Amino acid sequence: MSLKIKNLTVRFGGQTAVDDVSLDVPAGQITGLVGPNGSGKSTVMNAATGVLVPDRGSIHIKDKLLHPGRPGDTARAGLGRTFQIPRLARRLTVFQNLLAGARDQPGEQLFSLFFRPRRVADAERSIEKRAHAILKRIGLAAKLNTLAGELSGGQQKLLTMGMLLMSDCKVLLLDEPAAGVNPALIEEQILLLQSLRDEGRAILLVEHNMGMISRLCDSVCVLDSGIKIAHGDPETVQRDPRVIASYLSMQPEQAPAKSQEAHQ
Amino acid sequence: MIEFLIYMGTIAGIWAVLAISLNLQFGITGLVNFGQVLPFAIGAYGAGIATRHELGIPAGVLISLIAAPVFGALVVWPARRMAQDYWALITLGLAEIFRLLMMNVPALGGGVYGLSVTRMPGWSISFSLTLALLAVAYVISERVIRSPLGRMLNVIREDEILASTLGRDPFRYQRSIVMLSWVLAGLAGNLYAHVTGYVHESSFMVIETFVIWTAMILGGAGRTIGVIAGAFFVQALTTSTRFIAQWTDLPSDVVANLRLALVGLVLVLMIVYRPAGIFAERRARHVAED
Amino acid sequence: MQVIVNSMIYASQIAVIALGVSMCYSILRFTNFAQIQYAVVGGYLLYVLSALLGLPILPAAILAMAGTGLLAVAIDMLVFAKMREATAESKMIASWGVALFIRSVIAAIFGGSALYIETNISLLPLSGVFITSLDIFVVLASLGSMVVLHLALVRTRLGTALRAMSSNLGLSRARGIPTETMIRLMWFIVGAFAAMGGILVALQTQLTPNMDLSILLPVFAAVAIGGMSNIFGAVAGAFLLSFTQNVLIAIDFGSLLGGNPWYLPAQFKDLVAVTALVIVLMANLQGRLARWGKATA
Amino acid sequence: QDTVDIGVIANLTGSNVLPSVNLVRGAEAAAKAINADGGINGAQINLIIEDSEYRVQEALNAATKLYDVDGVQSAIMFGGSNLMIPVAEMARDKGRVLINVSSSSPTLADFTGTLFSVLPLDNIVGKALGEWTYDRGVRKAAFVVPNNAFGTGLMEAAAAAFTAKGGEVATKVAYTEGQPDYRAEVQSVVQTGPDAIIVTGYGDDSHKWFRLARTLGLDVPWYAAYPSILSIENPEWMDGKLFGIDNGGLNQGPAKAAVEAYKAEHGEDMLAHYLYAYDAIGILAAAMKAEGTDAADISAALPGVVPTYEALTGKIVWDEKNQRIDPPLDLIEYKDGQFMSMD
Amino acid sequence: MTSRHTTSLSLTDVDAGYGKVAILSRLSFATDPGGILTILGANGSGKSTCLKALMGLASLTGGTIRLGDEDITKMPVHRRVSLGLGYVPQVDNVFGDLSVDDNLRMGAFLHPQETPALREQALELFPQLKPHLRKAARLLSGGERRMLSIAQTLMIKPRILLMDEPSSDLSPKLVEEVFACITDLRERMGIPVLLVEQNVTHALRIADRVIVLAEGSKVLDRPTEAVTLDELGEIFLGRHPVTAQQD
Ligand SMILES: Nc1ncnc2c1ncn2[C@@H]1O[C@H](COP(=O)(O)OP(=O)(O)OP(=O)(O)O)[C@@H](O)[C@H]1O
Ligand SMILES: Nc1ncnc2c1ncn2[C@@H]1O[C@H](COP(=O)(O)OP(=O)(O)OP(=O)(O)O)[C@@H](O)[C@H]1O
Ligand SMILES: CC(C)C[C@H](N)C(=O)O
Ligand SMILES: [Mg+2]
Ligand SMILES: [Mg+2]
């Protein structure tokens, strides 16, 4: 399954946050979306997932047109996402949040709940099993009974990632999954995303961590003030002077070095 | 005395069913319903209308059983596009509309004269029926709360957008829980009408909704056992103060007011010292896998 | 014309109280039922000061407002300060209990029946419109106080700080805002304003300990129509509500439709008003009103 | 046995408190007088007073406590029909006696044997009021009543009698009790230009009505059922403008003495409810003296003792359902700051 | 340049957490006057809690906190701010319902007279905020929020800065700018900085001293020169038992 965004335009009052952007997120690939702060990356994601109604443009999954502004429909079409500022059920435990991530649970129907208890119980057991596995991968195994609202900033990021994994979606949209996550777990995330890609999923990755973008992305799209200014493989894009000027600025090597010896 | 306790138990039991119903909507799903007295009134008037047209008690129960969730499905409709605060006021308004209609259109609800209802013969029968209804409500509520459905309703309570990006339509969940809980409240209303033998609009004023809210919050929103305890506590508080009031020698109207002041005071103290209720909501526990 | 005047008068009475409710909601994020009871306290204080102790109305009113403001602060310290972290619903129930307590204490002291504050009212000599000097005073007083409150909230540093607290309490502390002091200040203002509303109602009608229950619905309706936390919205809501009520029973539907004169029976007044409220809410008009409120501010 | 318990249910909190306070005082005065006079065959009357908060549920709680915990055999009750009917249901089931001192719903006639009324149902007074108003020369009347069983029942009876004689109904206003403001309603009455207003209602609301009528320049006479329960807002303005039908005998004999004693003791005017409660306790005591203190005894004795009982509200005549009929009625006018009999 | 402030913030044996939940145990350290101290650690190791405890936003069950010579352990939050503690929170870092402009004004709550000047300075540092001044802060993009939060903090005119992951959500270019600004503050005014970061390379580049937390305890405390990335990697990955490695 692939995601296609065509001629997307989003305006907020006088500001054009996304200006006629088209983007392909093919299956089995990781597509990067980068750009300066406020260039419209999250907005693209919000429009693609129906959280926001675009002024123009259309969203297609597997060549099927999606209704704008209906996040539920979009999600049922197989699209899953994380938010830059984590959205969680704060008064539920980590484990419950994970369980809630799974789709199509018979136990959520009143009828089966009261008349097919066996089916409900079976489904619940298999979901729990998956949740335990994912819990380990995101490094929160010890926190399963902690309320999500009582997690640290980074842990919340990880949990939203876990919920996305539970959903088993074919198209994944990740908004800065690595921000606030510690380096060791970023490595883990990279491995995870690679394996998801290899399973044939379509992944759109918004990230300011250029190391991660270089290592993971098959192609990268760069936005600036809502306009697509570059598109191509990570290396080419990172050498593009326009991208350097607006987004990357000086390379780390040129930065005023203090205690250089520390990272040798 | 024992008859008195049985009667108080009956009333508290009916109130407990209403509180369970409200808890399913608010405590579990986060729907702020300030018109909880509406399904109660619908149920009660179901009994009244059945008696008036001589349809018999079962027909009345059937009316309540069908009318309450149907109204529920209609009332929850605006929740689809609206912040919770507004839904609260809409339910409050709709409950008032229903009451004022019953009051001012005699053809519907007997107008200001109310409707007579077949009365239950004896307290013990009404008490047993109340306990039975309470037990059913308890089982249903617990089953919902401890299931994937309850979990998803909790997610909706916390964040509707999250629920929809998880592929659920929050509105459908809200609708089914409102319908389910209104069935319970409607039955409670029907039972109540048969206990008092009379329905009148003045029994369904906004203030009754607050009694139910008080029971739920005081007992602990989110937990079935909590809201039941809350209902019994509120009933015990309002009646026990009558006995305290009897001991003084002050003029009767001053005593009556001081009694209510005491109720207010106890309520405030309870909530200040146990803001999460007598039985606070528990977090689910899962065992770690190794 | 008369209808507009009537609506204005009724609207001013409830708007001042609605203002307090919406301020409380926007800053402390809970529906405060005690707010309307503070209005009643204000009315009774005025009664004590003017009818019993013989002070002239104006200084008595100012003292009553200050007194109610202090009461609101005291109740905050005793009750609400202890539950800052509690959920909005718990606070709401606590405020319900506070209201019940105050109501009963007032009734125990002053008795349950109505008290009246005598004023010199004269009918103004206007052709076709009935309006009294008191009406003019009420409308001006409430309009004036609303403008003052609005300016205080929007144009001052303290007002912004109050709004900041409602948005993010922890952060406002970390920005150096003395939050507890500010909350007290807010309670004082809110209590004094409630008292003002209560005084206006008391002057126009009468005082009963449970008059909060009968103004509860119109007040909350006004707040709701106007958008829960928009102060001018609440005022617009009060006017809209009172206008609907008054217009609907003043229109001669019969003649309009070419028949015998027929008016909507008065007992349907509330029904119609509540229905209008619900329709307004459903039509999402509150957003529009709120914007209108901002534009005129 | 040296005491006899009698229950009193009244709304001492909530709205319409003043009538209840009067009622309790009337009952207490009656009990005191009877006790001073030797009680009921030696036993002293003990009143147990419960608050109904003007709410159905609390009225039921109060009644259950009285009947089941305190074990009273009889109780008197003030309250709208909406509170009275469920309590009457309960009293009938338990076989206890309930004396109605305020309600007027025709349904109350269905509890023969356990429910007794010491006041006439309002259709009787309403009819008399409608006819009398016409006879006084009023041709176009506006009706203003509270929107409850008492108000609308009275209004319908009065309007029927008034139109039967040929009068025109200008408008009928049934207002919601306890509202802060009745401006719109008063205005709608003004618009129809009536010759007079036929009115009933409790003190607090009537006060607001009078005040608004005065400030809005509504200058027509008022014809009231039970004018003594109204609260006069401005004596000079009202002078000679208020007429009404009240219970017979208020201005003479024992009732007049009671009215004056009340004013002396409490510093305010008495409402009729005092007298009804006084009579209710009186007939209960008479019945107990005659047959015994059990509910069944009281119920059996009441119809017998009532015709000979010297009531403050005039002679009490009951129909076969123990509802009061043929009450002695007084035509009243408000003059020089007080109600005067007009005969 | 010489440091004009010699303020130092120090914790001694601090136990802190949330309500009854204990997170930090017996934590002690002190900032060097005019130095940049970075706190590193795995997710959930207690870094944010440590900053909150210093600000008085977490509950303290033991230990003392001193600013210079003054014991501020029990001082209310707003008083600490008036003593010069500037704090950039990790999450919930702006007044969502207020306009960006009002957010800035609230940053200068303690300096009403200087508000216009401070606001100018802040907007000079983050010109990206200029077009959004009338927008409610909750509508900003993630990075714009972070900028607003940092700007707000600088408007307090802090004498010491506590920054919780200031670089996350920011573009590489802005990260450079923010870090340059931090060093600049230190160089020009001698303002000490307590920096919590997941961006280890960046943090090490500007820090004078490194502290590593694990499960609420300090496991390493050394000058930056004496720390190697490999060593940190090992601690983060938990490859070797976390033992207290005090210097
Ligand atoms: N709901 C909204 N209303 C008004 N403006 C908005 C809204 N959402 C976003 N914006 C504005 O649109 C622009 C793009 O925002 P967006 O969140 O897409 O940026 P971004 O590329 O994700 O940035 P960052 O890297 O900082 O997260 C920003 O200037 C932001 O202020
Ligand atoms: N409000 C809270 N209530 C209870 N426990 C909390 C709360 N906030 C955080 N915690 C717990 O405290 C521990 C430390 O959290 P803290 O936020 O200090 O971590 P951190 O080191 O800043 O992590 P990160 O790098 O992910 O931000 C975590 O285990 C977390 O679960
Ligand atoms: C006037 C009263 C004696 C009777 C009246 N029906 C009432 O309810 O109060
Ligand atoms: Mg973004
Ligand atoms: Mg942190």
Image (cartoon, helix red, strand yellow):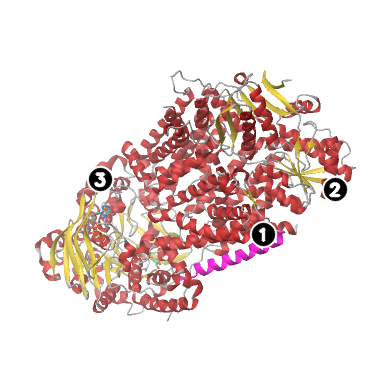
Q: Amino acid at mark 3?
A: Arg
Numbered disc 2: what chain?
D
Is C101 on the left-hand or right-hand side of D283?
Answer: left
In magenta stretch: residue B252: no
Q: Which residues are magenta?
A: B122-147
Q: Which residue is mark 3?
A: E119
Judging by the rendered image, the residue that carries numbered circle 1 is B9
Q: Is residue D208 above or below residue E224?
A: above
Q: Is residue A152 left or right of residue B137?
A: left
Mark 1 vs mark 3, foreground winner is 1
Q: Do we see residue E13 in this rendering?
A: no
The amino acid type found where label 2 is placed reads Asp
Separation of disc 1 and disc 3 at Cα?
Answer: 65 Å
Question: How many dots with numbers?
Answer: 3
For residue D209, side relative to residue E144 (left or right): right
- Relative side of A22 to C81, left or right: left
For the residues labelled 2 and 3, the Cα–Cα distance comes to 90 Å
